Image (spheres, rainbow, N blue to C red):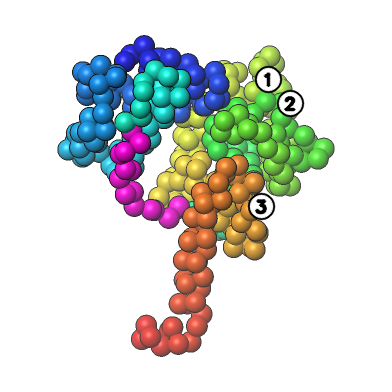
Amino acid sequence: MKKNIDRFLDYLKAGQGVSPLTLKAYAEDLRDFHAFTDKRLKNIDNHDIRSFLAFLHHKKLMKSSIARKLASVRSFFKYLHREGFISSNPARLVSTPRVPKNLPRFLTIDEVFSLVEKPQGDTFSATRDKAILELLYSSGLRVAELTSLDFGDLDIKESLVRVKGKGMKERIIPVGSRAMDAIRNYLPERISLKKESQALFLNVRGGRLTQRSVRRIVVHYSRMVSLSSHPGPHTLRHTFATHLLHEGADLRVIQELLGHSSLSTTQKYTHVDIKHLMEVYDKAHPMARDDEK
């Protein structure tokens, strides 16, 4: 099976343009499955896959993690069946575990403003960190999209940025004036490093900033402003979408800005918006206040 797993991973890397983190997750999930069963590939059936899920459940993995591993196994067997390595796809008969839907965490306007204003000074790190925080909130980028940005992806004159999303799909996103000002302040410090890298955001040694470093930056400043739950870059993406919806933006527009392939993925923000409306109602409506009394 190992040879077929490697073949599948090469297919994902070369033909599907998946991110390194996604590729790593596929590899981990499929190697876990391989370690679980010692059967030859052609002898594996749906009962073996269900036994794998039961094994993961016994190990007390979260349902979301189990569902992800099943998705990896499904993709693997779908590929093998399509390419003719197996005569039938055993994963088709295995249902996905029901995963509880958690509403995305987002910051209030006051919280996000205190966060993006926290980096102070004209040093390389301060100007870079402010540009990162402003851009994450202004444009709703995934952290992988932000770290992959090059100089050539930024149109300063038109305040636009070209982003390579999941599956290497490109989209053009507007950049707000505050974020663009922060980027303009950062660029002289970035250029002063005199590094040949095309990366927009660098570390102090001149290398491309990693996703882990961006997460550290966001968590660091969230602690400095004493936010209750230390948000990561994805929280700023949720905040971007939620604030747009609160201000009346069309869900289709938000879908395009976020780079979601399906509107159903974007629709989770409508649940956040309804929750927000109920909170406003409870605070403002006279009958709601009477009920509380």
**The C terminus: image quadrant:** bottom left
**The N terminus: image quadrant:** top left
Answer whether residue 154 is magenta in the image.
no
Relative to residue 206, is residue 215 depicted above or below?
below
Which residue corresponds to the image point at 68% horizontal and 20% vertical from the top-left?
198
User: Looking at the rendering, which quadrant does residue 199 occupy?
Assistant: top right
Q: Which residue is mark 3?
A: 253
Relative to residue 103, is residue 78 depicted above or below?
above
Q: Which residue is mark 2?
A: 152
Q: Residues within 10 Å of mark 2 (few under 14, many from 20)?
A: few
Q: Is residue 78 left or right of residue 171?
A: left
CB contact under 8 Å: marks 1 and 2: yes
User: Looking at the rendering, which quadrant does residue 87 occupy?
Assistant: top left
Answer whether residue 104 is magenta in the image.
yes
Q: Is residue 216 visible?
A: yes
The spot of residue 209 in percent (x, y) is 55, 25
Relative to residue 207, is residue 155 depicted above or below?
below
Q: Which residue is mark 1?
A: 198
Which residue corresponds to the image point at 74% horizontal and 39% vertical from the top-left?
160
Q: CA distance from mark 1 to mark 3?
A: 30 Å
Which residue corresponds to the image point at 43% horizontal and 14% vertical from the top-left?
7
Q: Secondary structure at mark 2?
A: helix
Q: Residues within 10 Å of mark 1 (few under 14, many from 20)?
A: some
Q: Secondary structure at mark 3?
A: helix
Q: Residues within 10 Å of mark 3 (few under 14, many from 20)?
A: few
Range of magenta residues: 91-105
The spot of residue 259 in percent (x, y) is 60, 42
Frontmost residue, 178 versus 193:
178
Q: Nearer the viewer, mark 3 or mark 2?
A: 3
Q: CA distance from mark 1 to mark 2?
A: 8 Å
Ranked by sequence position, the earlier of labels 1 and 3 is 1
The spot of residue 60 in percent (x, y) is 21, 39
